[in-house]
Image (cartoon, rainbow, N blue to C red):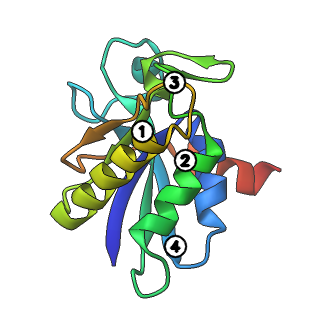
Amino acid sequence: METILFGAGCFWHVEKIFFNTKGVMTTAVGYAGGQINNPTYNQVCSGLTGHAEVVKVEFNENEISVKELLNIFWEIHDPTQINRQGPDIGSQYRSCIFSSNQNHLNIIRNIIINIENTKRYRLPIATILYEEEKFWLAEEYHQKYLIKNH
């Protein structure tokens, strides 16, 4: 089982997409990339903690590759937007990826270079790559929110 964290705007929508992806074993929403331990949703929304809303994706590499997960990631949000996704504005909605797997990090870097070289987007990629997986689970009411409520 491998793990990667994706930040692509509101974590509810991102989780719903990855939850329904073949090869993904589990998902959970939470916070990563900030300065305090175990932040609350309200603290993260204040913009003062530095955390991003992320989805922890645990997957079986025999069923789905990191490249396939990244293809989904690029399709579900605009990776050129800085500190926002659509109407959601704030650093907690930034485009970001967290991984401590060096092979995955190399794949991600190469894909970003390829996207930039092929001018897939009009603007440069703003996705921030973090070489860690420090993850704080969000409050229970956020878990599988759109799956339970829509």
Disc 2 and disc 4 in contact, CB within 8 angstroms:
no
Comparing 121 with 34, the one in front is: 121
Which residue is pictured at 20% across the width and 24% down the height? 35
Q: Nearer the viewer, mark 1 or mark 2?
A: 1
- Identify which amino acid the numbered label 3 is placed on: Leu
Comparing 104 with 139, the one in front is: 104
Task: Give the label on residue 123, or none.
Answer: 3
Q: Residue furthest right?
A: 150
Q: How far across and down, in percent of the image, does residue 106 sit?
A: 23, 58
Observer able to see residue 27: no
Give the secondary structure at mark 2.
helix
What residue would you read off at disc 2?
74
- Marks 2 and 3 sit apart, C-alpha to C-alpha, by 14 Å
Mark before the other along the chain sequence, 1 or 2: 2
Q: Nearer the viewer, mark 4 or mark 3?
A: 3
- Marks 4 and 1 sit apart, C-alpha to C-alpha, by 27 Å
Q: Is residue 60 left or right of residue 129?
A: right
